[in-house]
Image (tube, grey):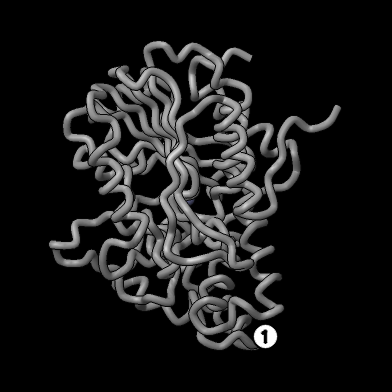
């Protein structure tokens, strides 16, 4: 039997498949152009497909590509949903699919955006003092060394393993991935102000979901947890009413701030500002995180990518190997993997009778 779905190879292919499926499903589509282009000079955009009853008070928002490269999976899931499930009953519901929230990272096969910024560390309150991460600073030159020689790779990895042995892996993960605002060529960098995608979200939400009273948000991610397993992650504590709504809706949901999740507690994720974005609605937001490879492979891919864009040449021949490494860390081309992700996603999106 031929596999039912597969990951696309480029951003443009993923976008075209999404737009075609949206068109066939009769969705209304809006395109928001990004100022830059992809590696082949291709146009970049955030595309929004909307289906169902525009006057419904209940809506579901599904976002792909917050972390660029993670959009290969997210886009495939959104596209499959449009193909298989969009005919299911939407009489009392609106479904909105945001494709490629960080289109630059998606096209350039990066987790971060055009400013080397992790979009999910960028939604802090920029009027406040910046979050501090002194421990990241203490290992910044080991995480992304300026020099790419074999000797330097060995030295820095050896040193990082020694420190990880001292700190323990959980603390290491928290230090590296919780977010940092000082090292613009580092990893999990939150930026120095609101980035393009951040500003777009605030502008778009001003006109999206007016009249909606109950909004569910599913933000699609990859790269953490066991391969093909989809963990629902809430950014609020278990005592919060939003967490309780989420578990009532989806079953097991792990709280990031209570330390239950595969994700470390982080600063500046966009799901943390949904109350600001939609003050009129009761928002229930989760990240759906699909596992790929082990955390060390993910970190090695991220540091190769950070080096390439910080100190190397993203247009060089060697850049292709780095992009392949990053893609393999965040998207698995084995059809069984995306099939597992699809089974999970379609059950989270209730109402899809297959
Ligand atoms: Zn992610």
Examine the rendered structure and indicate whether residue 26 appears above or below residue 14. Answer: above
Measuring from the top left, give residue 266's x and y in whole percent. Answer: 33, 53
Measuring from the top left, give residue 203's x and y in whole percent. Answer: 26, 48
Left or right: 103, with 293 as reference point: left
Left or right: 63, with 151 as reference point: left
Examine the rendered structure and indicate whether residue 126 appears above or below residue 140. Answer: above
Q: Residue at x 21, y 37 (%)?
A: 275
Q: Quadrant of the C terminus?
A: top right
Left or right: 331, with 243 as reference point: right
Q: Quadrant of residue 316?
A: bottom right
* Residue extending furthest toward the right: 1
Q: Residue at x 54, y 21 (%)?
A: 86
Measuring from the top left, give residue 145's x and y in whole percent. Answer: 51, 82
One can see residue 106 in this view: yes
Examine the rendered structure and indicate whether residue 250 appears above or below residue 117. Answer: above
Residue pointed to by mark 1: 150
Q: Quadrant of residue 188?
A: bottom left
Measuring from the top left, give residue 348's x and y in whole percent. Answer: 49, 24
Q: Residue at x 37, y 33 (%)?
A: 217
Viewer-side residue, 93 vs 169:
93
- Would the CB of label 1 be found within 8 Å of ligand 1? no
Viewer-side residue, 77 vs 266:
77
């Amino acid at each position: 039997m031929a596999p039912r779905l597969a990951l696309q190879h480029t951003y443009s292919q993923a976008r075209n498949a999404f737009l075609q499926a949206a068109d066939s499903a009769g969705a209304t589509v809006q395109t928001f152009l990004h100022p830059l282009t992809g590696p082949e000079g291709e146009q970049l955009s955030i595309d929004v497909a909307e289906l169902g009853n525009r006057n419904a008070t209940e809506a579901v928002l599904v976002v792909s590509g917050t972390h660029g490269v993670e959009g290969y999976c997210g886009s495939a899931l959104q596209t499959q949903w449009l193909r298989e499930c969009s005919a299911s009953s939407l009489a009392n519901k609106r479904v909105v699919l945001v494709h490629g929230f960080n289109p630059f990272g998606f096209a350039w096969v990066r987790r971060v955006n055009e400013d080397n910024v992790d979009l999910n560390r960028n939604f802090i309150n920029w009027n406040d003092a910046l979050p501090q991460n002194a421990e990241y600073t203490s290992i910044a030159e080991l995480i992304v060394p300026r020099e790419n020689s074999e000797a330097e790779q060995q030295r820095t990895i050896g040193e990082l393993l020694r420190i990880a042995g001292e700190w323990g892996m959980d603390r290491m993960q928290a230090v590296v991935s919780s977010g940092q605002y000082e090292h613009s060529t580092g990893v999990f960098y939150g930026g120095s102000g609101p980035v393009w995608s951040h500003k777009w979200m605030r502008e778009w939400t001003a006109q999206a979901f007016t009249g909606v009273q109950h909004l569910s948000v599913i933000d699609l991610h990859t790269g953490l947890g066991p391969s093909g397993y989809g963990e629902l992650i809430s950014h609020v504590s278990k005592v919060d009413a939003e967490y309780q709504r989420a578990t009532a809706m989806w079953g097991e949901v792990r709280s990031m701030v209570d330390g239950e999740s595969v994700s470390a507690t982080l600063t500046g994720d966009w799901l943390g500002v949904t109350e600001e974005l939609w003050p009129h609605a009761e928002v229930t937001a989760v990240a759906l995180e699909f596992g790929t490879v082990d955390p060390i492979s993910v970190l090695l891919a991220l540091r190769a990518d950070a080096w390439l864009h910080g100190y190397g040449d993203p247009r060089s021949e060697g850049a292709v190997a780095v992009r392949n490494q990053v893609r393999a860390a965040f998207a698995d081309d084995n059809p069984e993997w995306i099939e597992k992700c699809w089974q999970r996603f379609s059950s989270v999106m209730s109402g899809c009778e297959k």
